[in-house]
Structure formats: C-alpha cells, structure tokens
Amino acid sequence: MEAYINELFNEFGVVITVLIISALPVIELRGAIPVGIGLGLSTIDSALLSFAGSLIPVPFILLGIRPVFNYLKKTRLFKGLVEKLTHKSLKKSDNIKKYGFWGLLIFVAIPLPGTGVWSGALIASLLDMKFKMAFPAILFGNLVAGLLITAISSGAFKLFG
C-alpha cells in the first residue's frame, strides 16, 4: 500500500510539474512536452497535459491584460517595462492585423521563440481582438504547435533511446 501511495504522489508531482511548466511564458508547451516525456509520462499524456496547461493563462491575458497594463503605465516603476512589452508585441503583429484569425493561428502555431500563446494572447488583446475570435485561433494554433513538438520530441527520444 505504501509503495502505491508513493507512486501516486510521484505521478501527481510529474503531472503538476508539466502543467506548471506549460503555463509559463516562453517555455509553454514547447518545453513542457519534452520535459513530460523525459520525466516518464507517455507521449500522449505529456502532450495533453502540456496543451491544457498552456491554455490556462490565455483567458486571463485576453480579458485582463489591458486594465493591468493601463494601471502599470501610471507607475514610475513599471511604465517603461509595459511600454517596451507593448512595443515589442505590436512589432510582431503585422500578419495578425492583416489576416486576423488565421494570422493569429499561424503565429501561435509556429514553434519558435517569441511566438506562442502568451505572445499571441498579448498581441490579440492589444489589437482589441474579440475573445470569441482570439481564443479559438490561439487554441487551434496551440494544437498545431503541440502536434509538431510532440512529433519532434517523440522522434528525438526514440532516436536517442
């Protein structure tokens, strides 16, 4: 019984670790999927947990970042940081402005640094995209990125054994 409880807690710890890693900016599911596989989760479990975890911050960013940024712009401490983040994000937004839903989906789907759900949600929010258009684009873009990273990760783990 004790071994079963220890195994259950170990499995729970891995699940929570993958969920947390996938919800972090920059890392997102692109880093969480290989981490989950490396920690012993099946490829499918790692991909599903990473996908779910990476979507956790999206509604908060889409619905709440503008008021937070507006408040922080009024402070001396954070004004420069907010302006820099806004400028840097909007600099990447040309295709999203031009192609809307599809531009955002492709932006999130490309598994490169500086793209992903955090950046996509921030750009969508700064461009005043409606939640009902932005969230599905981010969700499907994230799904594409997850499938790509899962394919790459599972192949790499098989290759290096």
Image: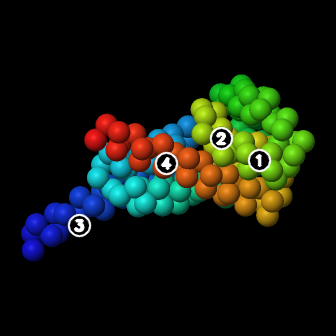
Q: Is residue 151 left or right of residue 110?
A: left
SS for tag 2? loop
Query: What number is the disc on residue 151?
Result: 4
Residue lying farthest bottom? 1
* Residue 101, position as x, y percentages in the image: 82, 53
Report, in whole angstroms, how far the alpha carbon at label 3 lies from the one at label 2.
Answer: 35 Å
Residue at the spot 49% in from the left edge and 48% down from the top edge: 151
Residue lying farthest right? 98
Q: Quadrant of residue 59?
A: bottom right
**Which circle's residue, 2 or 4, is located before the other in the chain?**
2
Q: Which residue is mark 1?
A: 104
Dot 3, how many residues are within 10 Å of its Cα: few (below 14), some (14-19), or many (20+)? few
* Residue 60, position as x, y percentages in the image: 65, 55
Report, in whole angstroms, how far the alpha carbon at label 2 lies from the one at label 1.
Answer: 10 Å
Q: Which residue is mark 2?
A: 110
Q: Is residue 129 left or right of residue 43?
A: right
Which mark lies nearer to you, 4 or 1?
Answer: 4
SS for tag 1? helix
Camera sees residue 44: yes
**Which circle's residue, 2 or 1, is located before the other in the chain?**
1
